[in-house]
Image (tube, helix red, strand yellow):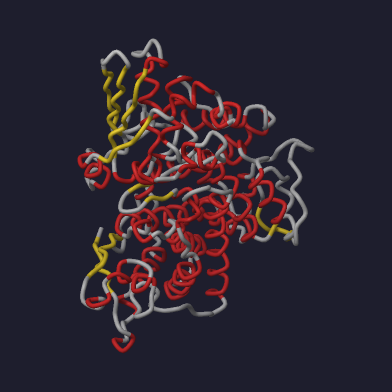
């Protein structure tokens, strides 16, 4: 792994493309290094994971709208859409849109947190859609997904978007473009242009995850994946991109990220050091990512498990005076009381908002001792009087040590949890802490293949026919042996008449 310093240059410097981050990303994508078996195994796990959460959400509003839009773009021999028969093909960018929205809707697939945060599994829908359309093999798909994960994880390690109020899909556009380029075996020059186009078109802002959070939170990564497919298509036809997109005088770094607040020294400072594999080095970044056992923001995972553990120590939840969650800067300011979002304390808030309220999540987990992707967010559940009382007794506080551990580069001490202090009305206290969720690779029970399969079976129970469930699980575990044109078998089909119909629109 090599660190690449990234700074801003004036146009007159004529920065060579070999010195540009986008060119280096493209070089990683064009390097046909063998994919190691543990990486292949994890890719299979994450395809199962994505399918599980997508099918569980398949008839919710946003996935239904996205699917209905995509169905207006049928294409013979194109990509498949979750729920629909595999014999029906659609234009790949629209299939990526539909499937990406379904995957993202429940906020329950994989995660990686470092300088910024991300859901690297968002790379799977666009790369898979192109693989199906272009009739590539299972091994081609594996190479493409290993690349998409590698680029996104390493951008997230180095470049913080959220401090500049930029949504994290700005790292997804380039990573998906790089993954598609690797899948198709494109030349470095073509991938370079596609990566730049994808970044240029996917810079959006964090209001999508602030205040009254709407369904756009589910659409946003799918939008980035769709734009990445389109960027690669244009680049394959010989079209260029704004360049240099990272380092230029009027680039993303210069005017949106760190250069924006450093105008006097804008050309002097190195803003980021981005790690990338050297030529011939295996792409292993997916092994540093982790999935969710519970349908909630990742910073909630350890706290849900901690609530389950603490509830047995409190015979009467009504005897609680106050709950203080001592945690990281990110947890406090994004999903805690530090966000200053009144919606996070509102029983009538949307599911998307409740999903980003650790106060609500901890209260329900403490009361119920379980977490369910539907029941735990139901309006009736959120409005329960005893829940509202407990919920409004909870506050978060930033603690320096948890913030340090959150940003640590040492996997052994990196943490996404908290210390919880429960003050009782009789003056006693109950205190416990948890650094990582049980399902985390360093947790009490790290997720393995059997756990991914169990998650799939739980989330799709009552939605899929047992035969279809078994068929998909058998095929996906045989991914390296799937030949060219066989990837449509990775689609998951609902029984006839089981899909909701969306409202009419333009498409």
Q: Position of residue 22 (x, y in %)?
A: 38, 70
Which residue reaches farthest bottom? Answer: 12
Please tell me which residue lies in front, 274 or 504. 504
In this rendering, position of residue 234 left or right of residue 73: left
Q: Residue at x 54, y 33 (%)?
A: 347
Please tell me which residue lies in front, 256 or 47. 256
Q: How many marks?
A: 0
**As drawn, 286 above or below 31:** above
In this rendering, position of residue 352 left or right of residue 326: right
Q: Position of residue 40 (x, y in %)?
A: 43, 45
Q: Residue at x 37, y 66 (%)?
A: 25
Which quadrant holds residue 29?
Answer: bottom left
Q: Position of residue 502 (x, y in %)?
A: 74, 48
State the quadrant of the N terminus. Answer: bottom left
Please tell me which residue lies in front, 38 or 321. 321
Which quadrant holds residue 426?
Answer: top left
State the quadrant of the C terminus. Answer: bottom right
**As drawn, 241 above or below 504:** below
Which residue reaches farthest top? Answer: 315
Please tell me which residue lies in front, 207 or 232. 207
Q: Residue at x 42, y 57 (%)?
A: 147
């Amino acid at each position: 792994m090599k660190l690449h310093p990234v700074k801003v240059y004036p146009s007159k410097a004529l920065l060579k493309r070999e010195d540009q981050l986008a060119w280096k990303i493209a070089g990683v994508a064009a390097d046909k290094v063998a994919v190691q078996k543990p990486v292949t195994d994890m890719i299979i796990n994450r395809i199962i994971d994505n399918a599980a959460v997508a099918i569980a959400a398949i008839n919710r509003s946003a996935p239904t709208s996205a699917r209905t839009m995509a169905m207006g773009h049928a294409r013979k021999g194109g990509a498949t859409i979750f729920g629909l028969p595999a014999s029906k093909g659609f234009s790949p960018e629209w299939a990526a849109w539909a499937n990406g929205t379904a995957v993202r809707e429940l906020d329950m697939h994989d995660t990686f947190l470092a300088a910024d945060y991300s859901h690297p599994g968002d790379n799977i829908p666009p790369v898979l859609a192109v693989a199906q359309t272009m009739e590539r093999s299972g091994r081609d798909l594996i190479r493409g997904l290993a690349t998409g994960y590698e680029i996104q994880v390493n951008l997230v390690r180095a470049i913080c978007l959220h401090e500049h109020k930029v949504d994290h899909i700005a790292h997804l556009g380039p990573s998906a473009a790089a993954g598609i380029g690797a899948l198709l075996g494109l030349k470095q020059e073509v991938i370079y242009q596609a990566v730049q186009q994808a970044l240029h078109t996917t810079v959006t802002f964090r209001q999508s995850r602030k205040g009254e959070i709407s369904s756009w939170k589910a659409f946003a990564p799918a939008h980035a994946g769709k734009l990445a497919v389109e960027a690669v298509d244009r680049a394959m036809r010989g079209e260029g991109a704004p360049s240099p997109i990272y380092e230029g005088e009027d680039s993303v770094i210069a005017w949106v990220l760190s250069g924006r607040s450093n105008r006097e020294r804008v050309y002097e400072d190195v803003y980021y050091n981005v790690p990338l594999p050297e030529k011939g080095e295996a792409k292993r970044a997916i092994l540093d990512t982790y999935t969710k056992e519970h349908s909630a923001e990742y910073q909630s995972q350890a706290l849900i498990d901690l609530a389950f553990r603490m509830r047995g120590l409190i015979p009467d939840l009504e005897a609680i005076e106050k709950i203080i969650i001592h945690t990281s800067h990110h947890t406090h300011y994004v999903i805690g009381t530090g966000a200053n979002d009144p919606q996070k304390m509102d029983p009538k808030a949307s599911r998307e908002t409740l999903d980003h309220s650790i106060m609500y999540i901890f209260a329900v987990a403490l009361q119920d001792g379980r977490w369910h992707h539907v029941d735990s967010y139901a309006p009736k559940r959120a409005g329960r009087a005893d829940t509202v009382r407990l919920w409004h007794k909870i506050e978060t506080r930033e603690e320096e040590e948890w913030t340090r551990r959150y940003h640590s580069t040492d996997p052994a001490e990196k943490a996404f949890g908290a210390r919880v202090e429960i003050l009782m009305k009789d003056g006693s206290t109950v205190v416990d802490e948890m650094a990582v969720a049980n399902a985390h690779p360093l947790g009490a029970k790290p997720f393995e293949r059997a756990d991914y399969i169990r998650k799939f079976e739980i989330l799709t129970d009552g939605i899929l026919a047992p035969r279809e469930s078994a068929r998909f699980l058998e095929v996906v575990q045989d991914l390296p042996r799937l030949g060219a044109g066989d990837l449509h078998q990775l689609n998951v089909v609902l029984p006839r008449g089981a899909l909701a119909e969306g409202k009419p629109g333009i498409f």
